[in-house]
Image: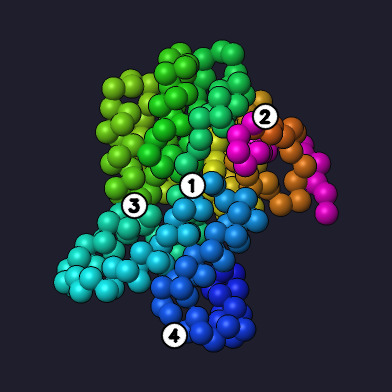
Amino acid sequence: MLGALLTGGLALLFPILLTQPLALAATQGSCAAVVSYLLRDPVWWLPIHLGFMPLAVLALGLGLPSWVWLAGFIVLLLVFWRTDRSRVPLYLTNTASSEALLKLLPAAPCAAIDLGCGDGGLLRRLALARPDCRFVGFEHAPLTWAWARLACRGLPNVQIRFGDFWSHPLGDYALVYAFLSPIPMQGLWAKARAEMKADARLVSNSFAVPNIQPESTVTVTDGRQTRLYCYRPGLGTRTYR
């Protein structure tokens, strides 16, 4: 949205852009990439923002049959599903963040859950490093869920579940991991407070719980300086404004 507003403002300043569809599309992609960078979105989103609209304009000039566009829409729907309702994009946890999260697991065998596991990459890395632990991942997008199931099929200590994690109890897990968005964090905190044990840890990648002081914050040494916000929802937690 912000990228579109910036593009509109530039088009008013430089009306010639309105006569050059490819240049206008490139401007929109650049504005979207700048906004994404300022919001500290994952780095791999930048080429998507830069290339999406220019490629769409170029594809329109190819005169492709209508079924191609329908097929593309279906694939995108199966990968991202109803992000308009969940308000959670597809975020993938990088290797550096996985290594940092591995250090947050208890030394003793335990169970951990990834609330929105995407392609299952994080769970694969954790499961291989800690075969003594049990890992559960939830994914609501059909194609991404199938991808994760296939990728984790040889790991007996990983279970990939399809659907919404909100109805799944969190009381059995020593570590609950979330890489969601700012929108659901307040609701997740309420759920964690009601269900998680006192010694269990909630770890949120990049998105802090509003007005709640984390127990600790881990800064990951990756390109975007990812932050892992660590909480103990089962304990009394200091709030701030």
Comparing labels 4 and 2, the label whose residue is closer to the camera: 4
Real-space Cα separation, disc 1 to disc 2, in angstroms: 36 Å
Q: Residue at x 60, y 26 (%)?
A: 100
**Is residue 17 in sight in this rendering?**
yes
- Find numbered disc 4 in the image and state the secondary structure of the residue it sits on: helix
Query: Residue 160: x percent and y percent?
Result: 36, 35
* Front disc: 2 or 3: 3
Which of the 4 image quadrants contains residue 215? top right
Tag shown at residue 19: 4
Image depth: mark 4 or mark 3 in front: 4
The first of marks 2 and 3 along the sequence is 3
Instruction: Please give the residue where the numbered disc 1 appears in the rendered image.
Output: 44
Q: Residues within 10 Å of mark 2 (few under 14, many from 20)?
A: some
Q: Report the Cα–Cα distance between label 1 and label 3.
A: 16 Å
Q: Is residue 88 above or below residue 199?
A: below
Q: Cβ–Cβ below 8 Å for labels 1 and 3?
A: no
Q: Amino acid at mark 3?
A: Val
Residue type for callout 1 = Trp
Which residue has dot 3 on it?
79
235 within the magenta span? yes
Of marks 1 and 4, which one's residue comes earlier in the chain? 4
Q: Which residues are magenta?
A: 221-241
